[in-house]
Image (cartoon, rainbow, N blue to C red):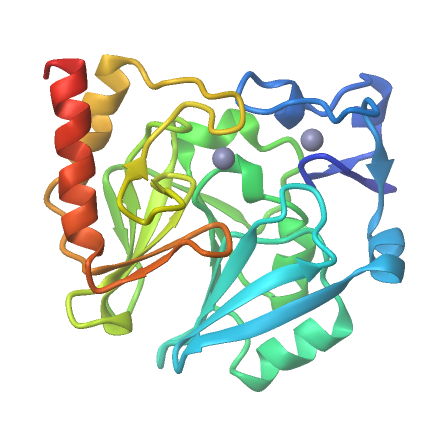
């Protein structure tokens, strides 16, 4: 079986998808086809031109990124925890140095996703670390290459271990989720993916159907995100991109941002 990777979004597929022409993640209205049209690559090619850069945020948290940037250019997170480590979201490249580093920290007990934009090469990561992949069942139709490692979860909250929980918000995708990690800060930290999108000013958190295409949520969709997230306790937020670290004041920014939406949507 040959596996191919979309150059625009970094999602890996079985080669048959190529026959249909366009990556189904990129043809969705939240994404876009690259300027040069649909282009495909593969893991061997990525290894030739890129490396994985792992950077420490604090004693329990690392960012995991591709250098030079590829596809969406986002970052995943390695969360260290006594009962087992979690990879939050994923990146397309997996090389031996990354496997060795992660194993030196205790390996992975789970890979957990915010949403389909970051599925990347999730099945290869799960095989390398012999761990399950947690995806909210509302996003099952966006899983185009699925191995037995993928475990769908349902409902509003899925506790893992050590005060680590997956929280369903919906909004950006039907299954969009957050990871709340209690031990990362005094009141807990939220790993947000694209479920909450911290602005450049770090004074606003956006919640949108599409960020690159600037498509708003409907009033009903936003109301659901708000209902599911209003009671969350946290003081720190880490988003999917460099610069989206907000330590200490994250809940204040969240509350003010939600109030702006509530006023705008006349909820
Ligand atoms: Zn794509
Ligand atoms: Zn996204």
How many discs mark residues in the rendered view?
0
Q: Nearer the viewer, residue 34 or 104?
A: 34
Question: Residue at position x 63%, y 39% from top?
Answer: 146
Question: Residue at position x 52%, y 82% from top?
Answer: 106
Residue 154 shown left or right of residue 150 in the figure: left
Which of the 4 quarters of the picture holds residue 179? bottom left
Residue 32's spot in the image, x, y percent?
65, 22
Which of the 4 quarters of the picture holds residue 68? bottom right
Residue 52 sits above or below residue 58 on the image: above
Q: Nearer the viewer, residue 35 or 2?
A: 35
Residue 225 shown left or right of residue 132 in the figure: left
Q: Nearer the viewer, residue 64 or 100?
A: 64
Question: Residue at position x 76%, y 67% from top?
Answer: 95
Residue 74's spot in the image, x, y percent?
57, 49
Which of the 4 quarters of the picture holds residue 31? top right
Residue furthest front as drawn:
201
Residue 185's spot in the image, x, y percent?
23, 71
In the picture, which quadrant includes the N terminus? top right
Residue 237's spot in the image, x, y percent?
31, 56
Residue 119 shown left or right of residue 236 in the figure: right
Q: Does residue 20 appear in the picture of this structure?
A: yes
Residue 224 sits above or below residue 235 on the image: above
In the picture, which quadrant includes the C terminus? top left
């Amino acid at each position: 079986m040959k596996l191919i990777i979309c150059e625009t979004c970094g999602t890996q597929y079985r080669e048959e998808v190529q026959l249909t022409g366009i990556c189904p993640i990129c043809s969705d209205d939240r994404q876009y086809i690259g300027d040069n049209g649909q282009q495909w690559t593969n893991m061997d090619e990525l290894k030739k031109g890129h490396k994985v850069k792992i950077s420490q945020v604090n004693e329990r948290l690392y960012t995991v990124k591709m250098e030079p940037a590829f596809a969406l250019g986002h970052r995943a997170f390695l969360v260290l925890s006594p009962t087992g480590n979690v990879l939050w979201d994923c990146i397309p490249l997996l090389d031996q140095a990354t496997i060795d580093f992660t194993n030196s920290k205790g390996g992975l007990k789970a890979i957990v996703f915010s949403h389909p934009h970051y599925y990347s090469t999730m099945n290869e990561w799960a095989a390398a670390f012999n761990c399950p992949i947690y995806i909210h069942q509302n996003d099952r139709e966006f899983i185009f290459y699925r191995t037995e490692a993928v475990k769908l979860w349902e409902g509003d909250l899925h506790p893992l271990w050590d005060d680590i929980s997956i929280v369903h918000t919906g909004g950006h995708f039907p299954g969009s989720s957050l990871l709340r990690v209690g031990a990362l800060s005094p009141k807990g930290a939220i790993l947000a993916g694209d479920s909450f999108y911290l602005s450049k000013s770090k004074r606003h958190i956006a919640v949108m159907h599409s960020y690159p295409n600037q498509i708003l949520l409907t009033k009903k969709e936003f109301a659901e995100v708000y209902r599911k997230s209003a009671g969350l306790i946290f003081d720190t937020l880490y988003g999917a991109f460099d610069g989206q670290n907000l330590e200490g004041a994250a809940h204040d920014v969240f509350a003010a941002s939600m109030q702006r939406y509530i006023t705008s949507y006349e909820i």
